[in-house]
Image (cartoon, coloured by chain):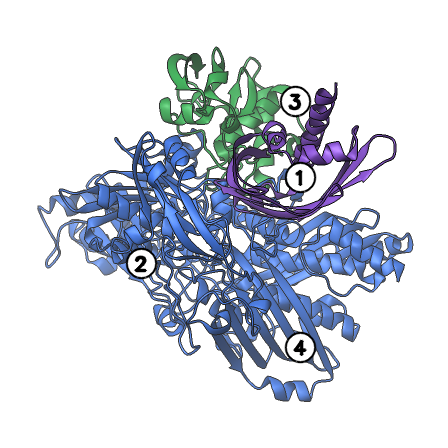
Chain colours: A blue, B green, C purple
């Protein structure tokens, strides 16, 4: 391997150059001549029969090209597909029409679309479409929806139960019988709205001459979207190009395929004109998939000295009105398998009820299933600490899997790759100054002040995933990743990746990787992603997989290039490959370094091909498909210190320390940024965010005025540290960084607040900890 | 109804006929094709559409194009001069103040306004003055550092606009 | 959501009653009314332009007045829908002679809203509905006094 300083260097991001100067091209920035614009008429009812649609007036309005109802497009656009078909759990996938036909099932369900020459005209005409509804009874809560007598969304989904998924290892019942300590707690993991700063949108341009469709799409996984768009429109896959090079954030919400994008493509084909649709923020709130929304009943069994012997979770996940693309996998495989956390828990049982309600669909949201598991587990650890009288640090240590026990197979069948949980915990304790803090807490308590210290010692599953595991879980795809490294005659390189970064900075980190492996200067390497006409098939960016999986494909392709180049260099130097050293882009003969060729020399020779080594082909290019043998398991400790003002109920985060072990790190600056952003999102769940529905199914937090996306002053300064435990799963020894912050931070903040309020006898409250809720709880306790 | 407006954008004078109801952000993006100014919400909460309007930061998604008649506007495209990044842009680059980049143009324009008013802001002042701009990626910490970087750089370079 | 309130009109109870049930009053005094067609006894088709926060637009629907107990109280039923969403409400309007030539109108009702107006503007509905009601009653008062003088 070449030795350069690229791996591990905080190289400034190259994608910034276009983004800071307003020259990036997000979907709405793409221009096509004669584009027509789409506006969507949406149901204001959460549940209603659609009895009539009168578009006669709208059709006559200025600029209107056409008005289409669901019935008009039944033959053009197939139903929205669900691509995670859980086996063995009686999964029912109800028909999900891109435009509702006969019945609307949530507020925002599309009922008709208007196409007009400009967006203003389209909006005007959408106003004029008259829809008659017959309102039906509404159910928004998942526990209510499964009860007998609840309003039914579908005739063929009894009790609105889409699936009941079970996973178990060991025997919880036995463990519970013999336990010294049993703790039960119900947790509400509230519904969140992802709020990527760029809303969803599409520009679809169909060429009737060639029968091809070009689609600019806000997507985290353009190839998955191409495949699904081909399936729903009937346009062959090779005739569709999806381009998602610049995407303004996703956080999971741009994984699914949505109806709006499908309709725009279908109509573009029907009209032979480019069709654009950009969601307004209000539409984004009601139609782009939400996240979380669990109700979890947890039972924990432990010995009197604080060793956990078993955990059981019976849970209800709210999937909204339809099953979104990846939805069934999120509260099941991505949740249930993680219930062991960093602890040795021999007996685990999980039952997850997937429920349909008259709400917006839910799907992956940063962390996707793993934050929910970590939250309940870390809350249970604190409850166990309380019950045993142990320090929350000690109770965690007693249950940690030990460094010499890896690879370690947990009761939920996952095999953890590597870990050193105490090391991360020790570093975090030192950074936060734990002992002094406890003293300070005691002092403040004697003054009637509420300081709290909260822990989260987490492990998460990243680097999704071995494709065989994807198949076993019912995911209708593989989870390998692809790369092509193409060295040009001049020695500069183009790298094509199937990963699809949209803020994670892989145009930079991947170039660092290639430079590190090949010695080609960083600035001579271009990373191409997001455009299905340029890149090889790939599965996209989510599940902290881009670098762990996509980066691996790049490393192996680079190494194959170096191997080939070494054979060429040996030939050119009249030596044999075994006698060639490779260092920093230079091939030299062992023992006589003055006899050397650079990789650029070799690239030129390989392209000229005037004098090929025996049996070699021209060119210097390699494609690699990397399918990981296992997931990766980043871990760490987050500690949050809060003071709660009993007079106002306001929580002030005084200190936030995160020590994450992500294995090796390619670009520390970028990784810190990922950790910061992740913490902000997880902390916001604990303190601020909450999608509220009224009993009629109206989303009450339907804009940025009502839903608290955190602002500058809501997020504290974060102190970030790292330990390094490498993984054998990939050639870089790294684990993935995109989701750890979100997964770890929520319980750390909540544990801190509960710790602060513990003198009042408060053991648990549900999120978010808004000042009003906290104040009410304090008043209640003080009153009693 | 149509209005004739004359607007100077990034130093270039444009005369256009616009509908009464056309939003200024759509004028900038769709008529002038300056797509660096983004639309992130429709309630003026997110600040992705922040521009400098007669020298002050405004969110142009809730302004009409007709209101801009006679105005001097600077958008993100006008900030770098002759290919040289403005110190604020440098700050965002050096301190990793952006990830997906969608909020960045608005964030930079708001920071420009802030540094005009308070050339050497402390962390609290930065957080307070930029609270009209939302970022979902960074957790804000590196944006604070970016503005501090720019502040230092700008105070060491008198005459810099 | 529940809405309720009261308004004191400087007029006799019977005059207020008469005026409230006069379709011309609805036409003249309801802010933003664009269409008012009588479809039956105490039943009207109505189109009204209302802005709640940033959600502005026209609602088309029906108004029905029932359970008349002259000159004391009646029930009112309203439903309307449009691009901003839908509004449905029922309420009771009560009139009480204050003994000093003034009449207190008390209203209490239950309103359901949906669509954009429900998701974005619901928290502003209370103040907007109060503003509309106050504007309406003050206009009623003006009309009575104009007629009286």
What element does badge 1 sit on?
helix
Residues behind callouts 3 and 4 on a single chain: no
Q: Is residue A781 left or right of residue A556?
A: right
| Residue at the spot 59% in from the left edge and 70% down from the top edge | A342
Residues behind callouts 2 and 4 on a single chain: yes
The residue nearer to you, when weighing A643 against A513, is A643
- The residue under label 4 is A300
Q: Tag 1: Cα neighbours inside 10 Å, few (<14), some, or many (≥20)?
A: some
Q: Tag 2: Cα neighbours inside 10 Å, few (<14), some, or many (≥20)?
A: many
- The residue under label 3 is B118
- The residue under label 2 is A556
| Residue A492 locus on image (x, y percent) | 26, 41
Disc 1 sits on a residue from what chain? A
| Residue at the spot 57% in from the left edge and 21% down from the top edge | B154
Q: Earlier in the sequence, mark 4 or mark 1?
A: 4
Disc 2 sits on a residue from what chain? A
Q: CA distance from mark 1 to mark 3?
A: 18 Å
């Amino acid at each position: 391997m070449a030795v350069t300083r690229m791996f591990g260097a905080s190289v400034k991001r190259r994608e910034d150059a276009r983004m800071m100067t307003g020259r990036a091209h997000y979907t709405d920035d793409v221009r096509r001549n004669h584009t027509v614009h789409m506006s969507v008429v949406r149901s204001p009812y959460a549940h209603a029969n659609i009895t009539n649609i009168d578009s006669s007036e709208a059709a006559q309005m200025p600029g209107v090209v056409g008005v289409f109802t669901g019935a008009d497009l039944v033959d053009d656009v197939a139903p929205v597909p669900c691509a995670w078909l859980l086996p063995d759990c009686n999964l029912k996938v109800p028909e999900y029409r891109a435009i509702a036909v006969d019945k609307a099932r949530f507020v925002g369900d599309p009922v008709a679309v208007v196409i007009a020459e400009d967006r203003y005209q389209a909006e005007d005409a959408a106003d004029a479409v008259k829809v008659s509804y017959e309102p039906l009874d509404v159910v928004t809560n998942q526990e209510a929806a499964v009860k007998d007598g609840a309003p039914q969304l579908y005739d063929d989904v009894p009790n609105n139960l889409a699936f009941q998924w079970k996973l178990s290892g060991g025997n919880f019942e036995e463990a519970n019988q013999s336990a010294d300590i049993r703790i039960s707690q119900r947790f509400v993991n509230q519904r969140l709205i992802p709020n990527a700063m760029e809303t969803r949108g599409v520009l679809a341009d169909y060429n009737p001459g060639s029968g091809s469709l070009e689609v600019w799409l806000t997507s985290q996984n353009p190839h998955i979207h191409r495949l699904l768009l081909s399936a729903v429109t009937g346009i062959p896959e090779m005739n569709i190009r999806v381009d998602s090079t610049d995407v303004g954030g996703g956080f999971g919400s741009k994984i699914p395929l949505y109806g709006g994008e499908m309709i725009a493509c279908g109509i573009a084909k029907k009209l032979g004109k480019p069709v654009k649709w950009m969601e307004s923020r209000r539409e984004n709130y009601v139609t782009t998939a939400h996240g979380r929304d669990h109700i979890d009943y947890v039972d924990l069994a432990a010995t009197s000295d604080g060793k956990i012997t078993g955990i059981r979770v019976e849970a209800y996940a709210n999937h909204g009105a339809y099953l979104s693309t990846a939805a069934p996998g999120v509260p099941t495989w991505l949740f249930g398998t993680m219930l062991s956390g960093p602890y040795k828990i021999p007996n685990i049982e999980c039952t997850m009820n997937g429920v349909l309600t008259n709400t917006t669909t839910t799907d992956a949201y940063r962390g996707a299933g793993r934050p929910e598991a970590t939250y309940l587990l870390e809350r249970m650890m604190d409850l166990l600490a309380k019950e045993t009288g142990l320090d929350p640090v000690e109770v965690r240590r007693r249950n940690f899997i030990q460094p010499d026990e890896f690879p370690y197979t947990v009761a939920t069948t996952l095999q953890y790759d590597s870990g050193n949980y105490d090391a991360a915990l020790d570093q975090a304790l030192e950074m936060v100054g734990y002992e002094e803090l406890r003293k300070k807490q005691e002092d403040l308590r004697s003054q009637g002040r509420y300081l709290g210290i909260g822990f989260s010692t987490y492990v998460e599953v990243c680097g999704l995933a071995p494709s065989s595991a994807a198949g076993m879980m019912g995911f209708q795809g593989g989870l390998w990743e692809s790369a092509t490294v193409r060295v040009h005659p001049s020695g500069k390189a183009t790298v094509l990746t199937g990963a699809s970064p949209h803020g994670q900075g892989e145009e930079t980190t991947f170039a660092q990787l290639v430079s590190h492996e090949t010695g080609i200067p960083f600035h001579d390497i271009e990373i191409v992603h997001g455009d299905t006409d340029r890149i090889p098939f790939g599965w996209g960016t989510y599940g902290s997989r881009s670098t762990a999986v996509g980066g691996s494909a790049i490393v192996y392709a680079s190494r194959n290039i170096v191997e080939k180049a070494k054979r060429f260099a040996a030939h050119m130097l009249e030596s044999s490959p075994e006698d060639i050293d490779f260092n920093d882009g230079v091939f030299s003969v062992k023992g006589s370094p003055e006899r050397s060729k650079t990789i650029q020399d070799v690239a030129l020779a390989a392209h000229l091909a005037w004098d090929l080594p025996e049996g070699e082909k021209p060119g210097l290019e390699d494609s690699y498909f990397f399918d990981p043998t296992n997931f990766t398991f980043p871990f760490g400790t987050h500690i949050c210190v809060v003071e709660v003002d009993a007079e106002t109920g306001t929580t002030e985060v005084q200190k936030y320390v995160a020590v994450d072990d992500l294995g090796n790190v390619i670009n520390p600056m970028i990784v810190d940024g990922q950790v910061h952003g992740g913490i902000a999102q997880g902390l916001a769940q604990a303190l601020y965010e909450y999608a509220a529905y009224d009993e009629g199914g109206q989303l009450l937090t339907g804009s940025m005025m009502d839903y608290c996306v955190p602002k500058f002053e809501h997020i504290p300064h974060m102190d970030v540290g790292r330990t390094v435990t490498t993984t054998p799963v990939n050639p870089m020894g790294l684990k993935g960084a995109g989701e750890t912050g979100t997964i770890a931070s929520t319980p750390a903040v909540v544990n801190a607040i509960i710790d602060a309020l513990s003198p009042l006898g408060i053991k648990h409250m549900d999120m978010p900890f808004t000042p009003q809720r906290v104040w009410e709880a304090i008043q209640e306790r003080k009153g009693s | 109804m149509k209005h004739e407006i004359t607007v100077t954008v990034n130093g270039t004078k444009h005369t256009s006929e616009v509908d009464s109801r056309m939003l200024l952000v759509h004028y900038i993006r769709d008529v002038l094709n300056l797509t660096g100014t983004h639309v992130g919400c429709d309630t003026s909460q997110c600040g992705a559409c922040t521009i400098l309007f007669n020298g002050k930061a405004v969110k142009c998604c809730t302004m009409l194009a007709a209101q801009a008649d006679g105005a001097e506007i600077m958008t993100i495209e006008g900030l770098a001069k002759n290919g040289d990044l403005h110190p604020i842009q440098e700050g965002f680059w050096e301190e990793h103040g952006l990830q997906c980049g969608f909020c960045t143009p608005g964030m930079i324009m708001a920071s420009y306004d802030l540094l005009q008013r308070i050339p050497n802001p402390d962390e609290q002042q930065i957080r307070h003055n930029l609270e009209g701009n939302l970022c979902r990626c960074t957790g804000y910490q590196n944006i604070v550092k970016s503005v501090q970087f720019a502040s230092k750089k700008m105070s060491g370079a008198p005459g810099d606009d | 959501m529940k809405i309720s309130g009261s308004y004191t009109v400087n007029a006799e109870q019977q005059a207020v009653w008469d005026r409230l049930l006069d379709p011309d009053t609805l036409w003249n005094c309801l802010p933003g009314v664009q269409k008012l067609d009588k479809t039956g006894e105490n039943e009207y088709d109505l189109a009204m332009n209302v802005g709640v926060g940033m959600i502005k637009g026209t609602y088309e629907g029906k108004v029905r007045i029932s359970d008349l107990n002259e000159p004391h109280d009646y029930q009112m039923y309203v439903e309307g829908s449009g691009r901003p969403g839908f509004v449905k409400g029922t309420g009771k309007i009560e009139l009480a002679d204050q003994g000093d030539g003034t009449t207190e109108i008390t209203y209490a009702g239950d309103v359901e809203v949906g669509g954009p107006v429900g998701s974005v503007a619901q928290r502003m509905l209370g103040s907007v509905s109060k503003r509309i009601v106050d504007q309406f009653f003050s206009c009623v008062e003006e009309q009575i006094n104009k007629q009286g003088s």
